[in-house]
Image (cartoon, grey):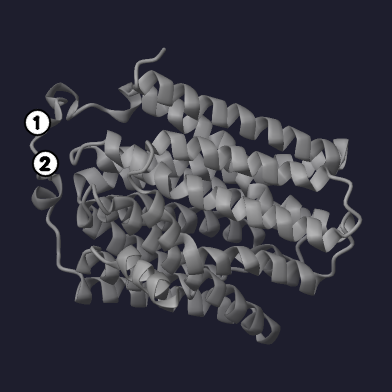
Amino acid sequence: MFNSTIELYKKAYSGLTKNIWLLSIVMLVNRSGTMVLAFLTLYCKKLGYSTEQGGWVVAIYGLGSVVGALLGGKLSDQLGFYKVQFGALFFGGILFILLGQMNSYTAICICTFVLSMVNETFRPANATAIAHYSNKKNRTQSFSLVRLAINMGWGVGIAVGGFLASIDYHLLFWVDGFTNIGAAIMLLIILPKVSIEQQKKPQEDVSIQGRTAEYNQSPLKDKEFLLFLFFVMLFALCFFQLFTTVPIFMKENLGLGEAQIGTIMAFNGVLIALIEMLYVYKLEGRRPYLFLITIGTLLMGIAFSFFNLPFTNGFTVAVFAILVLTFAEMTAMPFMNSYYISKSSELKRGHYAGLYTMAWSVAQVFGSSLGAIAAEKVGFSNLWWIVTMLCLLSAGGFYFLLLKKIKIL
């Protein structure tokens, strides 16, 4: 049993290209220094600004990320993902250090917007890079490996960030800045340069794919993709409650302490790190992407509905809900990447990635604020029913696209 499990893990990680592994290492280094955003509100309070003012700074970061997502997508198709990744990491690092020197509220807001805009150009370029370095057979695994590196780095960054913040908040900006710059330099050293001509060279024969006329199509004319993005936004609005309203609910309604909440939230990351690659390997190719995304979205709705069940043990409720939500995340999100990449061509892949990233950025801005407002106005119980209904609507949308794709509708 043990040997067969080990063999399964080997298969799950085999077949990935060398460049995907190298890119994952770059992401691990970069995300291990990611700590400023998590402590940005507290930093503003440390400078003497109100909680509301700190919240606006985070909102401005979100708005900048929306602009950066669109800009990054366009630049990736015009200049190439290699240059955009390097520029976003290097100049983003400088801007992190610069933000740490700002004291006036106006300067902080302006610098935050520019930083997030530059920083977010990285995401579409990175998605385009993953698509280029992988092939159709192992694309979902490739996205999952990079996601694994990001999650591991994020965990390290938050832990180190909390320690550094207890000493001096300014250290967060220096560490975040230098890890960005270090990742940029590492990218130049360990990853071979990819020219824009190499990037745009079709990996498959376009005529064989049967979509020669669509090869240069703008994603804005792809109605199916735009509808997919709308349902992704609904999914993301619900998903981001995990990092905003869920911890508050666990403390105020389930009676859990900070240590218990931290342990339960860490359970999500640990489970993803341990089994997502294996899970994705077993699912890949078994069902259409849209079917798996539909199932994952339904699972997320079920997870949030658990918060309204009349259990007496709050810890049990929280653990069970997070367990189901984690499987929902692993079932849906890796295949969302594979689905939109499969719809794009090498010529417009950055544009597709930019719009996909923007959908998540918009959901992050509105999901965080609207969830908190709803919890305050109508209560957590009603919030969880609203979120559950949004998940069902999103799942229905993905299933509609699936039926349309197989021409049942």
> What residue did someone put label 2 on?
204
Classify mark 2: helix, strand or loop.
Answer: loop
Q: Residue furthest front?
A: 1
Kindly check if marks 1 and 2 are in contact, taking CB atoms under 8 A apart as contact: yes
Seen at 72% across and 70% down, the residue is: 262
Above or below, 121 against 341 in this view is below
Task: Classify the position of the N terminus by image quarter.
Answer: bottom left
The residue closer to the viewer here, 277 or 189, is 277
Relative side of 296 to 285, left or right: right
Above or below, 58 against 343 in this view is below
Q: Quadrant of residue 181?
A: bottom left
Count of number-bearing discs: 2
Classify mark 1: helix, strand or loop.
Answer: helix
Residue 304 at x, y = what percent?
72, 44
Mark 2 surroundings: few (<14), some (14-19) or many (≥20) residues within 10 A: few
The residue closer to the viewer here, 397 or 233, is 397
Seen at 31% across and 38% down, the residue is: 351
The residue closer to the viewer here, 177 or 349, is 349
Q: Amino acid at mark 2?
A: Glu
Q: Can see residue 240?
A: yes
Seen at 15% across and 50% down, the residue is: 199
The residue closer to the viewer here, 151 or 283, is 283
Mark 1 surroundings: few (<14), some (14-19) or many (≥20) residues within 10 A: few
> What residue did someone put label 1 on?
208
